[in-house]
Image: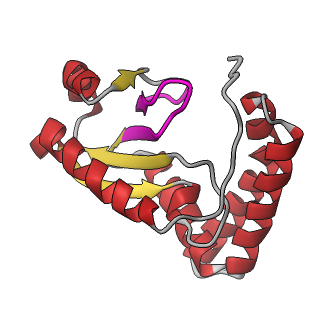
Amino acid sequence: MNITRKVEVVSHKAEWKALFLEESEKLKEVFGDEIINIYHIGSTSIPTIYAKPLIDIMVEVADIERIDRYNEQMKQLNYEALGEYGIPKRRFFTKGGDNRTHHVHIFETGDAEIERHLTFRDYMIAHPQEAQSYSLLKQELAKKFPENMDGYIKGKDSFIKNIDRKAVKWRKGETE
């Protein structure tokens, strides 16, 4: 997977929440009763940190297998359907081509990825110092890998895994 998109991180924008809400309404029109919940995830959901200007949306559904029948409707909203795209039992959609504006990650209720994403987001919001460390890392990596999305993503990997570990303990009421 050689990703050659430009890596750009920008300071937090207040309009990201509004963009999430606006897109959520469009997704509700497409998927209707399939949707159990829609969540704003990723760095644009964490106030005050730098992020790629890309809205990550996670949709929870009752039956992931039924989602493929909506690919054409998603295409009408300018989304590209990418199937699982490396994560089993996920449906992944991107909008904006090489200048992506939105990612939609769809998981079935009970998938561990739902809890992982929400726990990461909530932990970062509750721990602003950790969020700022993540923000600084993202800025450094964007400078180091301005034309190398793979390098940028790999550079964040160990930090994210460490936060995931801390966040699980925090969610369980343990230390951190």
Residue 53 in percent (x, y) is at: 56, 49
Q: Residue at x 32, y 26 (%)?
A: 78
> In the image, is residue 129 above or below residue 133?
below
Q: Residue at x 84, y 36 (%)?
A: 145
> In the image, is residue 151 above or below residue 161?
above
> In the image, is residue 71 above or below residue 26?
above
Residue 24 in percent (x, y) is at: 27, 51
Residue 123 in percent (x, y) is at: 60, 72
Q: Residue at x 59, y 65 (%)?
A: 12
Q: Is 24 positioned to the left or the right of 126 in the image?
A: left
> In the image, is residue 29 above or below residue 40?
above
The range drawn in magenta is 85-106
Quadrant position of the C terminus in the picture:
bottom right
Quadrant position of the N terminus in the picture:
top right
Q: Is 97 positioned to the left or the right of 126 in the image?
A: left
Who is closer to the viewer here, 90 or 11? 11
Total numbered labels placed on residues in the image: 0
Q: Residue at x 81, y 33 (%)?
A: 151
Q: Is residue 28 magenta?
A: no
